Image (cartoon, coloured by chain):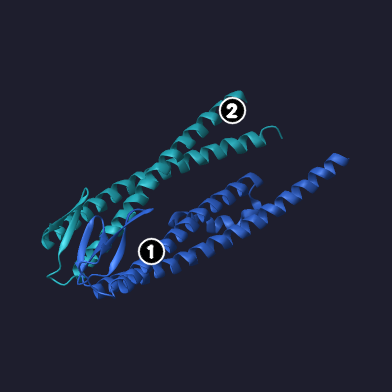
Chain colours: A blue, B cyan
Amino acid sequence: MATTKAESQPQTIDLNSLPTAQVNNVKNQLTQELQHLTTSFSQLKQAQVKFRDCANSVRDGLQKGEGTPILVPLTPSLYVPGKLASTDTVLVDVGTGFYVEKTPSAARDFYSRKVIELGQNLQDLEKIVQGKQGNLNVVEDVLRQKVIAENSKGGGEGST
Amino acid sequence: MAEIQQKLQGLSDAYQKLQQDLQVSVSARQKLESQQQENKGVQKEFSLLPPESNIYKLVGPVLLKQERSEAVMAVEGRLAFIEKEIKRIEKQIQDMQSESENKKMEVYQIQTQMQQGPQ
């Protein structure tokens, strides 16, 4: 990432002197990077929503205490009735296959911490996306001008 | 002219091959990075845990109870391994990048030669 950034800086400056094909290449590269970053952004957003849902489930789901009737999903479309056996602790997936037994309040802490972390990442990523978008706009402008200039030049030659 | 054309073709083929290899290495690097992030998160989580917490490890479809020290060590081991792998791939990527940069320059040179030729 760092190298492309360092490269794109001088390229942006002498973009006008580059042939159209190369400007097009730069544009394509930027578009690709932007696409990638936008996908990452929405994935992060989804993860954040998931963690928030988990925190809510822990809060609302365990409120009523032991013996509360629940429906347990066996598959996404098949549920069987059950009862909450214990609301003292929950198992939290902390990643890479490890699960930790936590009290509900500790689990909520864990999830809200994750949400905050992801929120920071999202902010950082948003800045990068905006920067890239700016770069892309500049490159597209230059490309458009070049194409227009070339077309008018070609049309002039054709008429004579 | 045909000779230059041929040379250009060979160079751009080699360049494209390099770019493909580079792509593969870069995605491997990204995958390692995300694994490192995940393991770091787990490590941090372990360090924040109250000492009496139960830790389970998912083995296939079963959760096995694990000693905290064992789990911490497993994560540390993974992190060390990932770090080594990242260093290795990083070097690979650098080599490939400089090589593909060289190829690119050669292609440009030939291209400008060809453009200037007919004038």
Identify the residue at horizontal 63%, vertical 33% (top origin).
B114
The x and y percentages for residue A121 are 40, 66
Identify the residue at horizontal 29%, vertical 58% (top origin).
B38
Please rate how many residues cluster around mark 1, counting C-alpha atoms within 10 Å: few if below 14, some from 14 to 19, many from 20.
some
Residue B51 appears anywhere in the view: yes
Residue B5 circle label? 2
Does A99 sit left or right of B29 as displayed? left
Identify the residue at horizontal 64%, vertical 55% (top origin).
A140
Amino acid at pointer 2 = Gln
Residue extending farthest to the top is B2
**Residue A29 position (above or below residue B117):** below
Say how many tags the image has. Answer: 2
* Residue position for label 1: A50
Does A138 sit left or right of B30 as displayed? right
Amino acid at pointer 1 = Lys
Foreground of the two, A123 or A160: A123
* Chain letter belonging to callout 1: A
* Chain letter belonging to callout 2: B
Foreground of the two, A71 or A103: A71
Q: Are marks 1 and 2 in contact (CB under 8 Å)?
A: no
Residue A96 circle label? none
Please rate how many residues cluster around mark 2, counting C-alpha atoms within 10 Å: few if below 14, some from 14 to 19, many from 20.
few
Does A60 sit left or right of A126 as displayed? left
Residue B94 appears anywhere in the view: no
The x and y percentages for residue B52 are 12, 70
Cα distance between the residues tagged 1 and 2: 55 Å
The x and y percentages for residue A8 are 53, 56
